[in-house]
Image: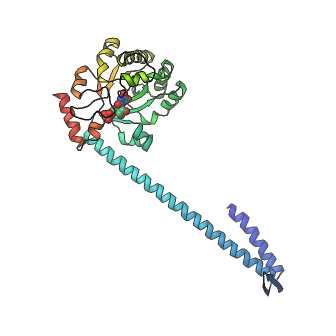
Amino acid sequence: MIRLFITLPFVLGLIILAACNQGSAPMTWLEWQWNSSPGVLALLTGAVFYALGYVCAWIGTLGQIRRARKAEQQVRTLEAEAATLRASVAAHASAMVKMGLEFTYAQGLEAVREVADGLPLFLDLKLHDIPNTVASAIGSLARVRPAMLTIHASGGRAMIAAARRAVDETFPEGARPLLLAVTVLTSLDAEALHETGVESDVADQVVRLGRLAVSAGADGLVCSPHEIRLLREALGDGPVLVVPGIRPAGSAAGDQKRIMTPAQAHAAGADYIVVGRPITRAPDPAAAAAAIAAELSA
Ligand SMILES: O=C(O)c1cc(=O)[nH]c(=O)n1[C@@H]1O[C@H](COP(=O)(O)O)[C@@H](O)[C@H]1O
């Protein structure tokens, strides 16, 4: 519309100019000379530039169409990937889907929701920031409806309490995720922990952070299988204990330092065990998951 408002008076002006200047006059451009009417010349020049402008606008539109098609293609690829993931999740995992930083950063929260597609979701984002930021981040998770949510216990009492309040305010009763506090990452051994400035040994630090987190409102803790007994002694059966650092006999530890087999962790009293690469990087993930399930029920 705005183009019409600019073009129309301009074209009208040119036509009037052409009508008022029909007489022939000598024209010079560089070394060329000829006779023509100034009005017709102005009209022709206007028409040429108008056509050029139109071609430029058309080329711009073509670029936009190409970009829109590419974006559409990306969305379709993403949807296909989500469908494949959903199918493999439905086939091999019945209890819970765990998705963390890698998937969420790569695909976004909407994809997390799509892949979980109604299955209970363990959303492992390990939030660790000032209380206000953590609370606001949790406030944005309403549409994802996780069943479990992780924060770092080392964020301190105020942060854990803010996360507790945010969970209670964001999710209706009956749909609240369990708020889990990660104690000491299972990838840390004593030496790595001391390097961060913590003098006490790993187990003491896990129990210290566990007490802090539960007293500030966490529903459960993430710890290695080696600290389950100590946490139970310190905190009783109330807190849910989620236990990564699980390695079936013979599988590579990778970056994990405080590890046990699935059966050992189960016997130690884990409520949930977390097994990642021994399944996801196995040549046959379904068979690896089935072997772990068999080990647990033996
Ligand atoms: O919060 C976690 O889930 C977590 C805490 C922790 O201390 N250690 C730990 O490995 N995890 C997570 O558990 C999973 C373990 O994966 P794998 O080491 O491949 O079995 C990863 O997604 C980690 O992010």
Q: What's the residue at 49%, 34% (across, down)? A: 140
In what quadrant of the picture does the C terminus appear? top left
The structure residue drawn at horizontal position 80% and vertical position 79%, both measured from the top left corner, is 39
Task: State which image quarter holds ligand 1.
Answer: top left
- What is the x, y in percent for residue 263? 21, 26
Task: Please give left or right for residue 177 compared with residue 229 in the image.
Answer: right
Q: Kindly identify the residue that appears in the image at 65 percent across and 72 percent down.
A: 52
Residue 96 showing in the rendered view: no
Name the residue: 45% across, 22% down: 154
* Residue 53: quarter of image: bottom right
Establish if 45 lies above or below 63. Answer: below
Q: Nearer the viewer, residue 88 or 208?
A: 208
Front one among 128 and 218: 128
**Residue sitting farthest toward the left:** 298
Location of residue 107 in the rendering, given as x and y in whole percent from the top left corner = 43, 44
Quadrant showing the N terminus: bottom right
In front of the other: 41 or 106: 106
**196 and 176: which one is in front?**
196
Q: Position of residue 186 (x, y in %)?
A: 35, 27
Q: 75 above or below 14?
A: above
**Residue 79 location (% of width, % of height):** 39, 50
Q: Quadrant of residue 86?
A: top left
Q: Is residue 225 visible?
A: yes
